[in-house]
Amino acid sequence: MANNKKPMNNLDNKQLGLLIGGVVVLVVIIVLLCVLIFGGKKEETEEVQETVAEETTEESVEEEEVTEEGDISLLTGLPIDTEYVNKRPYAIMVENTKPALPQYGLNTAGVIYEAPMEGGLTRFMALFDANVDLEKIGNMRSARPYFVYTATEFDAIFAHIGQSVHAENLLNTGICDDLNGVKGDMANTFYRTSDRKAPHNSYTSAEKLKEAVEKKGYRDTYKEGYTGHYVFAPANEPVTLDGCDDAAVIVPYFYENKPYFVYNEETKTYDRFEYQSAEVDAVDGKQISVTNIIFQSSEAPSGIYGGTQYVNFPLNGKGVGKYFTNGKVMDITWEKAGDTEVTHYYDANGEELKINRGQTWVCLIELQHFEENAIYATKADYENR
């Protein structure tokens, strides 16, 4: 007998259509929800990834700016245009008597040497990178042998107006390329002004120096293999001299001009004073301020050339000294193997001294006066001395 009842689990066509439609709608809703939720998160994730990538790239660029050496000056360790990085510097003799003040261009120099002269005076040799662009440099004066030897350490073109007899004999050996203001062929390289009396009114300019070098046919690039005079600390790892003694005020023994340096906390440099006032560069009107100071004592006591009044300052051999930076002081030693060899400085561990990037001032100290130099931990100590 036939059974006309439909099974309980079977659906008629209408019910089945409704069920299928409902499932489709549900699936569509689920898909839309997934798109909204996971798609949004994907976009958000991509945005985060892009942001992280951008920040990482920026950090990498900043890191490169800090750590990348690039083209640096061999005098200061600071950036210099590529066209000048291998160009020889100028070593210029500058007078340091009261009638010669203020001098022109010292804040532009990369390195300045101060050394004793006859009569208790000091004289400067200022070293300028080849990119110097000054219309007035000086006041210029005559040379001494120890300045000539020092100029060769920097492979510099040496500019001066006259010289002592011993310096003349040395220059005649061809030890360095020099521009001498008392020679007739250099008449256009130096000039005098009317605002001061001779001999305190002699100057030169960057343009005149460059023209003179070309006229003389001197080599304008560093000699092959020359790597510089100083070892500079990385730009992002400056020398702090942590653990060393404080040195807020530094007083070299020079008794005629009575110079001293005061540490400036804001600029992290030493401001220069002499003749009882701030020493100012007439070019920019600013006080002379330097990053590094080195006291370099002679190995043996200095003397006087026989039959003359001229100081004989020995440079070769080994000796002691002090390095000042960041308001601190460290004892150092130095070695110079020969007349034209570079002086090397060493720290207390015997490692070659690293100095901070910036301008360096070197005081050549006579051994017999080395203990007369004074160092004060604070400005108050100096004022209450």
Image (cartoon, helix red, strand yellow):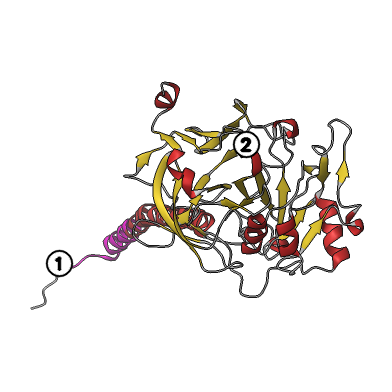
Residue at the bottom extreme, as displayed: 1
Seen as rendered, the residue at the extreme top is 384
Q: Position of residue 270 (x, y in %)?
A: 52, 37
Disc nearer the start of the sequence (1/2): 1
Q: Quick check: 316 left or right of 165? A: left
Q: Nearer the viewer, residue 176 or 356?
A: 176
- Residue that label 1 marks: 9
Q: Nearer the viewer, mark 1 or mark 2?
A: 2
Question: Around disc 1, counting alpha carbons within 10 Å, would you say few (fewer than 14), some (14 to 19), or many (20 or more)?
Answer: few
Q: Quadrant of residue 380?
A: top left
Position of residue 70 in the picture relative to residue 56 (left or right): right
Which residue in the protein does label 2 denote? 288
The magenta stretch spans residue 16: yes
- Measured from the top left, where is residue 249 in percent x and y? 46, 33
Please determine whether, in this image, residue 69 is positioned above or below residue 190: below
The image shows residue 118 at horizontal and vertical percentages of: 65, 43
Q: Which residues are magenta?
A: 6-26
**Badge 1 amino acid:** Asn
* Residue 147 placement: quadrant: bottom right
| Residue 122 seen by the camera | no
The front one of 356 and 148 is 148
Quadrant in which the N terminus is drawn: bottom left
Query: What secondary structure is the magenta-colored segment mainly?
Result: helix
Q: Residue at x 31, y 56 (%)?
A: 26
Helix, strand or loop for disc 1: loop
Q: Residue at x 84, y 52 (%)?
A: 181
